[in-house]
Each structure stands twice: as structure tokens, then as C-alpha cells.
Image (spheres, rainbow, N blue to C red):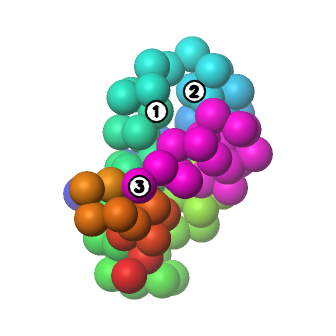
Amino acid sequence: MDDDVRTVAASALTPITVILATGLSHQELCSVVDTLWDCLAEGGDDLGSSTGAVMDLLGAMIAHPSVMEVMSETDSTGYALSVTHLG
């Protein structure tokens, strides 16, 4: 919940996105992507210190096909994961 902790965590994970994208199970990868979207939604302030770091991590993650697959999956309402967190 702490903005500074989100910033440090996202910054620490950005260099190892290939490991996250290829080494995590599908369920774990879904959880990471879901958490990143939640961090952006919970920030409340577009100028919060974690916003840039979380967006950098999410952008780096999206470069991997396995992450794009997770983001394109639909949930029980029929919406893709990325859409459910944006709207």
C-alpha cells in the first residue's frame, strides 16, 4: 500500500522481466500482472512516485508473449484482464 515500496519493488523487478515472464507459472504470472494493474488503480495520484516505476515494469512485461497472452485472456464477465482494470 506504500507508494515508496511500490516504487522500489517495481524498479527492482524491471531488469528481470524475462525471468518473470518465462519462469513463473501461468497463475503466478496472472497474479503479477493483476497486481501491477491494481497498483496503478490504487495509486489515486497519476503523479505518485510509483506510477512511473509500475508503468515501466508493466511496459517491460508486455514485451513478452506470455504476458500478452495473460493480458488477452477473458475473465468470467468476458472482458480481457487489461480492460477490467482500466474501466
Q: Which amino acid does label 3 sit on?
A: Thr
Q: Is residue 37 visible?
A: no
Q: In this view, does 46 lie above or below 2?
A: below
Label 1, on which residue? 29
Label 3, on which residue? 74
Q: What residue type is labelled 1?
A: Leu
**Is residue 11 or residue 55 the one in the foreground?**
55
* Picture coordinates of residue 2, whole percent (x, y): 28, 58
Q: Residue furthest top?
A: 23
Question: Which tag is nearer the camera, tag 2 or tag 3?
Answer: 3
Label 2, on which residue? 20
Question: Which tag is nearer the camera, tag 1 or tag 3?
Answer: 3
Residue at (30%, 70%) from the top-left corner? 42
Q: Name the quarter where the C terminus is drawn.
A: bottom left
Q: Can residue 47 be seen in this view?
A: yes
* Picture coordinates of residue 26, whole percent (x, y): 45, 26
| Magenta highlight on residue 66 | yes
Residue at (61%, 29%) from the top-left corner? 21
- Mark 3 surroundings within 10 Å by alpha-carbon count, few (fewer than 14), some (14 through 19), many (20 or more): some
